Image (tube, grey):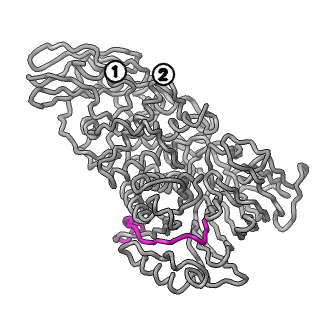
Amino acid sequence: MHLRRSATAYRGRIALLCSLFSAACSTQPAPSVVGPTPKPVPTVAPARPAPTAKPAKPATPQAPRAGSTRAFALPAWGAFDSAVARGTRTLTGEPGPAYWQQRTEYHLEAELNPVSKRLTGRGTVTYHNNSPNTLDTLYFQAYGNLFAPDAKRNTQLLASLGGINFTKVAAEGRALDSTAVGAGWTVSGTIMALRLPRPLLPGDSIELEFGWNLRVPPDAPRGGQDRETYVLSYWYPQVAVYDDVNGWQIDQYLGNAEFYMGYGDYEVALTVPEGWLVASTGTLQNPNEVLSDETRTRLARARAGGAVVSVVGEGDRGAGKATTKGSAGKLTWRFKAENVRDVTWATSNLYLWDATTAPVGDRLGRGVPDTTMIFSFYRPDQRRNGWGQSAAYAARAISVFSRVLWPYPYPHMTVVDGPASCGGMEYPMMTCIGGDWNVRTLFDVQAHEIAHMWFPMQVGSDEKRYAWMDEGMAQYFQSIAIDAQFPDADDAGENRRNYVGAARFGKETEMMRYGDKYPDGNAYGIASYFKPAAVLVALGGVISDSTVLQGLREYGRRWSGRHPMPNDFWNTMNEVSGRDLDWFWRTWYYETWKLDQAIDDVVRTSPDSVTVTLESRGRAPMPVLLVARGAAGATTSLLVPVDVWFQGEKEVTVQLAVPTDFTRLEIDPAERFPDADRSNQTWPR
Ligand SMILES: [Zn+2]
């Protein structure tokens, strides 16, 4: 999901000279710059720490955690330790040898009636129990009950017109009653408990059957309808996640905190009026039945590569033109998607359809670049919001992320224009973007949502408990795409200023907090979007941007299609960087410690050296990068390692070689770190 920044955050753009710090910190040759702030790389000779600074202890990702004192260790987490003991997780960040994951196959049919605005669905769900445990009860997400009049919510809705109405629930052909006794089902809020007629043993599977209907709500968060477009998200009973660390994730969907979804295969048949276009997760299985010859010809032209093709223009819409003529005025569109965590679809009779391709790198290992299809569906009047550019923008974001992360694995990326309440929202292979944008900001929101195709669509984290694991990643990577498209942008700096603005005044809440338990939306936004993005940029200042990206790629290799926990991410980064970074994770993810490094005093001890007294006025320990400048522009630098602060020191004195015409000393001139008060970082002040 996208969070709009406050207007004040856009003020005061400060150019980042980001790579200054990574060049000084990296133990490797200067990396090729693909981090979020690819600005010119100033040459800085790495300087040795002054003798008074304690040298960093050699760190290994395995215990003992040499670099961390107890104060900076990660808090104990019994459930994760138990998973390590059982062999499903490890301390190196790899899935354990005994890692398991549930799997589901969905065969779903749905019909949308735009007059009554009702969706009627039915289908079968086959659940495979790959866990070592016997299950008596399965849990399903009935997200649609967010719109029931008596629903518990922590978000405002314009209307609540009713929830999801189950017309059939059956297991292995046997109809089950809504009952609290014996085999049967009950619904509490947005969670259905389905007590099975027989225990589901490890390795066994069971087929369930559902019938349901719901009113498609207007202006619903993350979907719904605005009378012209219908975005059908969270529209079917979806199996809740049962994982190896936390068991069932069956917390209510209250509107704010997002989702945790398992992986499965889907076949869906979607019936809409003829002439309506359907965009969906998955690959269209029956183009000959629903698309006109002309539409298919134009799609083939788009598939051949090159410019954006108008597959359906303003004069092409309607039955017998864009689509075939249906029977009884309807057409059924069939889609198939494998190994995805959800299927979302959108439909309208007003949509235009643009298509092109995007390079994704050598996805199939054939030694040649592969491509994916890019589709954009939007109403003509959305051109005022920049939608004429949307296909080209999506192609750009897909190709950038495919390069810095790994090749986009899906057959298409589809961006749809939807109700304003979509804001910006992600689903597998799809985004819905609504509301007012322009040719500049539409790129930003698309880049953010498309970054979600990697996190959490591929790397399937628990968004409810750890919103930073997908939102923070998306916010970090949107900066990389924005920098590629608009080199004058300072998106990473805006993230940092948003976080610092809150941290300065004690208005932040720790990142490791359940997504529905923040005091307000602003605190949730800071902790889930801006701070985690700023923190990854700061991590690049500690281990280099290229190592951060290398770590994220390895994390993706290990956890794509799986369910990583925070410790899996941290342990992977520890291992890839060869550093014990637990002090970093503890400081930035669990605490609200402020970073405030200050120059307290500078004494000239010889023509070419100074003694500097540094202060840590906040509680966050970080390395200190000092840069000295001479009047003629020469610079020297010193990297003071983080562990000078590990015993609780508030002050440290270092020696620094300076140019003989030394005039100025500064901490972190590139503003790599989210320091709460930059006014005390220069000398003379
Ligand atoms: Zn997001």
Residue at mark 1 to residue at mark 2: CA–CA distance: 14 Å
The relative height of residue 639 versus residue 249 in the rendered view (above or below) is: above
Which residue is rendered at x = 33% and y = 17% of the image? 615
The relative height of residue 124 versus residue 575 in the rendered view (above or below) is: below
Which residue is rendered at x = 47% and y = 53% of the image? 437
Which region of the structure is painted magenta?
Answer: 346-367
The three-letter code of the residue at mark 2 reads Ala
Q: Residues within 10 Å of mark 2 (few under 14, many from 20)?
A: few
Does the magenta segment cover residue 364? yes
> Which quarter of the rendered picture does the C terminus lie within?
top left
The three-letter code of the residue at mark 1 reads Val
The relative height of residue 355 versus residue 210 in the rendered view (above or below) is: below
Residue where numbered disc 2 is placed = 71
Image quadrant in which you'd find residue 41 = top left
Please name whichever residue, 247 or 179, is drawn nearer the observer in this view of the structure: 179
Coordinates of residue 517 in the picture (x, y in percent): 63, 34
| Residue 343 shows up from this direction | no
Which residue is rendered at x = 18% and y = 39% of the image? 43
Q: Residues within 10 Å of mark 1 (few under 14, many from 20)?
A: many
SS for tag 2? helix
